[in-house]
Amino acid sequence: MYIDHNSTIREIFSQVEGVSQHGLDELFDDDIRDGNKSYAEEIVRAGIASRADVFSLVGEYLGCEVQVGSVDEVEAEVLALVNSDIANQYAVFPLYLSEDGLHLLAADPFNSSIIDDLTFSLNLDINLVVCDPSEIDRLVEEHYGKDESTLADLLGDISSEGFENLDEAKESELIDAANETPVIRFVNLVLQQAVRAQASDIHFEPFEDEFRIRYRVDGALYEMSPPPKSLALPVISRVKVISELNIAEHRIPQDGRIKMTIAGRPVDLRVSTLPTQFGESVVLRVLDQSAVNLDLDNLGLPENIKEGIRAAVRRPNGIFIVTGPTGSGKTTTLYSALREVNVIDTKILTAEDPVEYEIEGIMQVPVNHKVGLDFARALRAFLRQDPDKIMVGEIRDIETARIAVQASLTGHVVLSTLHTNDAPGAITRLIDMGLEPFLLSASIEFVLGQRLVRKICKECKQEYKPKRDVLETLGLNPQELGDRKFYFGGGCPECNKTGYRGRSGLFEMISITDSFRELINSGAATLVLRQKAIEQGMRTLREDGLRSIFDGETTIEEVLKYT
């Protein structure tokens, strides 16, 4: 119940008189922060409020009507306004029709895109009604039938459609194939399964003799049962149609975006196509806003790093760099840092490629290379917009780096990312780009390096004794470990037999001191900079990994893989 909106439910109940705030805080544990448990359910279970109270407060908060109790009867004309696909996709049920429009019971009344989408598709004004989600499940199943289609069922339907001869097809024929009902349902089901599995990416990969579809969950790729090779072109064409890409263009990479509601949840999908030997490879990055909690307190940061980030963004000027490989959570960290200073008296501008998450109160600019709007040009324009804080998605070239330095030296805080292996490497990388050491030393204030490692599943967590050679690889002496314990995940239905569920960060942070600036000015090597940072108290990624192992959060294998 409202598991995607745990923070909002907390905000709602924090304003209720007579409710113990201490009791609410105690219930808000890590599982709730990570979206593994429903805060509303826990409040009901603890006896703080009844289910009816929860729905009443949500209705009051949203300004929506509340349906109390079960729904006994709905007019056939009203029922006919919403088909089964819409009811299942948006998790809604038609209640009644009035002069104000169609009133829909919604499992997720917080999702405003339901109103936008259905106003357009049904040509009616839409009013959401708060109701027990279990009642909506009952009504949808009773009146429409539960959508229990499996990929295997759909593949059986598609096999008879005859898509074998599409390789040389015209654009109109590709569009027709992409709009076939079985293809539409297949793509929708693949996307639904990916979102339910909390996948970060979906890969559609055509090979000579097979068509492969893979999900990336918690950083690892998992393959679903491969569909027939003949399905590659209609499925990829379907993805290109809904992302508004040129369906007839197969020779160059294309980028697009899909906004849709899946199982009642708003989801953004970033689409990238790449021409390969046997067709186009398509990767969809899942930008599920409900799955990301943009709050520093919820990122699992060590206390000293958290305070360091807060100090960095609250400074009057200077550059704050976050480093790490693709998919290491750099953007999430920067967004969370910006939210700390997202107040009415602070002007914040961001340049991103693309804008991944929309944040109210922040002016976000998507770069557009087609019209010449790159990071450098956006950053140059920002300086004429009177900002206080600036975020640049990535420093890729010397021009962007120089403008970032200029911005920091003229009284702005600049946040950005850089692809390097560790925090000290960011310094030498910027100098290698061509940035003068004296300018860099005068402007840079903090550098944060990070990685994401998979967390051991709490349901199947088991203690074990690692082999001596594995410990030595980590630099550990078995005789000095004392009573320290090591854990792994045995595999269970909760973690899909992987032994892992969710991810947590490993961090290393350099706070630039005067002595560190002298080393930068002298052109010191990365190794020297690293040694100086350690002397100043920096805990390396490997050391933070050991902390995570000893806390029982992750495994030795994960730390060795990423540090």
Image (spheres, rainbow, N blue to C red):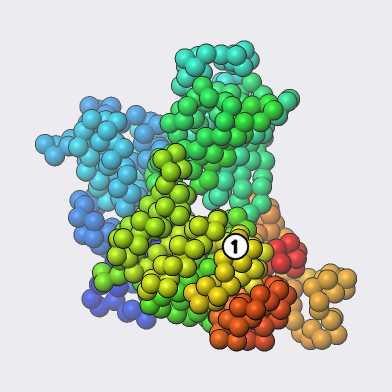
Residue 219 percent location from the top left of the image: 63, 54
Q: Position of residue 98 (x, y in %)?
A: 14, 37
- Using the image, determine if residue 475 lies above or below residue 56: below
Q: Nearer the viewer, residue 297 or 487?
A: 297
Residue 253 % position (x, y): 56, 34
What residue is rendered at 43% in x and 71% in y? 408
Quick one: label 1, few (<14), some, or many (20+) residues within 10 Å? some
- Left or right of 228, for residue 314: left
Residue 447 appearing in the image? no
Q: Which of these two is toward me, 25 or 408? A: 408
Q: Is residue 77 above or below residue 366?
A: above
Relative to 445, 55 lies left or right:
left
On the question of residue 256 being in view, the answer is yes
Foreground: 436 or 458? 436
Amino acid type for the residue under numbered disc 1: Gly
- Residue behind mark 1: 434
Q: Which residue occupies the foreground of this view, 189 or 68?
A: 189
Q: Kindly indicate the quadrant of the structure image that contains residue 557.
A: bottom right
Q: Quadrant of residue 432?
A: bottom right
Tag count: 1
- Quarter of the picture containing the N terminus is bottom left
Image quadrant for the C terminus? bottom right
Residue 418: percent from the left, percent from the top?
A: 57, 61
* Residue positioned 33% across, 57% down in the render: 363
What residue do we see at 61% from left, 39% from top? 203
User: Height in image: 429 above or below 259?
Assistant: below
